Image: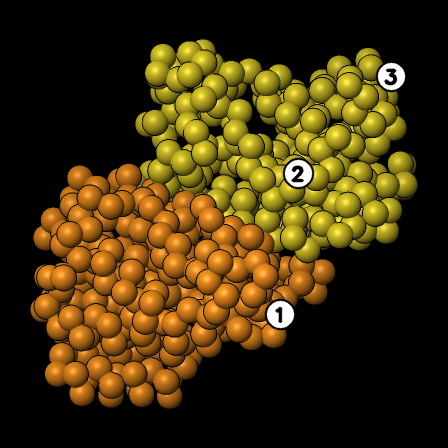
Chain colours: A orange, B yellow
Amino acid sequence: METALKGKNVLVTEVGNPLGRSCALAFAREGSNLVLGSLHEEDSLIAVEREIDALGVKVVSAIYEATSEDGVKQFVQKGLDQFGHIDVLLNNMTWPAGRQSFAAISFDGWKRMIHLGLTSSLFLCRAVLPRMVERNWGRLIQCIGLEGFVGGDPATSAVHAGLIGLTRGIATQYGKHQITANCIGYGGVEGLDNFPGAYPVSKLNDPLARCGTGQEVSSAAIYLASEDAGYITGQCYLVNGGRCFL
Amino acid sequence: MDTGLRGKVVLITGATRNHGKGTALAFAAEGANLLLCTRKSMDLLRETARLAAEQGIKVIARQCDVTVEAQVRDLVQSALAEFGRIDVLINNAGQRVHGDVMKLNMEEWQAGLDVNVHALFLNCKAVLPGMVERRWGRIINYTGNSFMRGILGPGTLKMATLGFTRAIAQEYGEFNITANCIAPWAITVERNPGHVGSGMTAVRVEGQAIPRRGTIADCAALAVFLASDQAGYITGQNYSVNGGAYFL
């Protein structure tokens, strides 16, 4: 499949987790240049940067501060300084962490999670959109988990479902600039969803009774970013082994 | 239909006009006692309370900013002192955030998050322990069709509401507590003077399956049903009241 992603500039967040890493590597294999970010996982960020570098594409990375719009802008600016523009935003605001019960979560903890997941994603979109509008081309892809559909960690459920609303809003507002916005709803990904308290594979109930791989999710991201996917917008493509249906 | 709501206690936020007021009156007609609140419009709230009390039920009307943790705690305490319980929570208070994503005012965004998302967290925190104790409860959150229509501000915030609702549904189902959303669309409501819509709210109802605007009562009836004993197996859902403008 000719994706026309060679030479495009792709920004991927949270490359420290298996999904972010898989996506970053998949775009690099398509010949895209990468801007990599993470909120705090510096070691894995550097490791992924090295892997990308070895694939012969240009790469820049940064630990960034997502609590303020300025922090997010500075991160994106680093990519803009290097490459001039961003073509694809792949926002992967996922952290493999234990599920917290509603009873246990504090109001401050809740607000912090909503801010980091939802408001900082809004900041990211705002930082990349102006150049996409100028160039009349862009792809925004939000990675979200099962929680928004079937419940789970309360903050994650709210954030991931909220990102669907944000995506549809941007799809509606920016379609006229040939910018598409979509979600990938992953589920059961090896290394992401198989921590204690997450969703174990159910041989009885899950159609594909196994974990998925980061690569199986990232190939959907590659497709949605490709030239051929230009008429797909505001959608949520599930890559979850059939664990839930939309 | 006997809804089993007689004598139950229902907390409704933003019960001054529109969905809040209509829902309050619908529950009063079922014989439920009410705890009503508003952030600032006490005159309107008292009027809702007066109309509801005509049904022979008990009503408490309180001023409360549901985005402030201490105020929510006080509000719920006042209901517990009077009624001893809260059985149904209706999160109706909302605030709209409109505009192009690049031009969103971040203070308005934060205010929208506070009322549409954070307040739900606080209200649920305050009422759920009692519901768990009694092994019965209903959480009903007003959303809308904005996220099906791609309206950015309300669509994002109300999708977050839906995600949170599903988390509550999953965590508390074992206690016979259900959590659902009501998604109105093209409902005739009173707006504040100078209200600025999304630009998409000038809905053309002619294309809908039911080519008319809906009423507050259409939505309040669904709230009553979702709170009833009969709806005990419905949870984590987002039910539209939209005249067939959009099919799931």
Question: Would you say residue B196 is visible in this rendering?
Answer: no
Looking at the picture, do discs 1 and 2 lie on one chain? no
When the figure is inspected, residue B93 is found, relative to residue A23, above or below; the finding is above
Q: Nearer the viewer, residue A145 or A69?
A: A145
Residue at figure coordinates x 45%, y 14% from the top left: B210
Q: Which residue is mark 2?
A: B234
Are labels 2 and 3 assigned to the same chain?
A: yes
Instruction: From the image, tell me which residue sits under label 1.
Output: A197
Instruction: Compute the Cα span from label 2 to label 3.
Output: 30 Å
Asked whether the beta carbons under mark 2 and mark 3 sit within 8 Å of each other, the answer is no
Q: Chain of mark 2?
A: B
Instruction: Determine whether the residue tagged by mark 1 lies in a helix, strand or loop.
Output: loop
Quadrant location, the N terminus of chain A: bottom left
Instruction: Give the image quarter of residue B34.
Output: top right
Residue annotated with mark 3: B56
Q: Nearer the viewer, mark 3 or mark 1?
A: 1
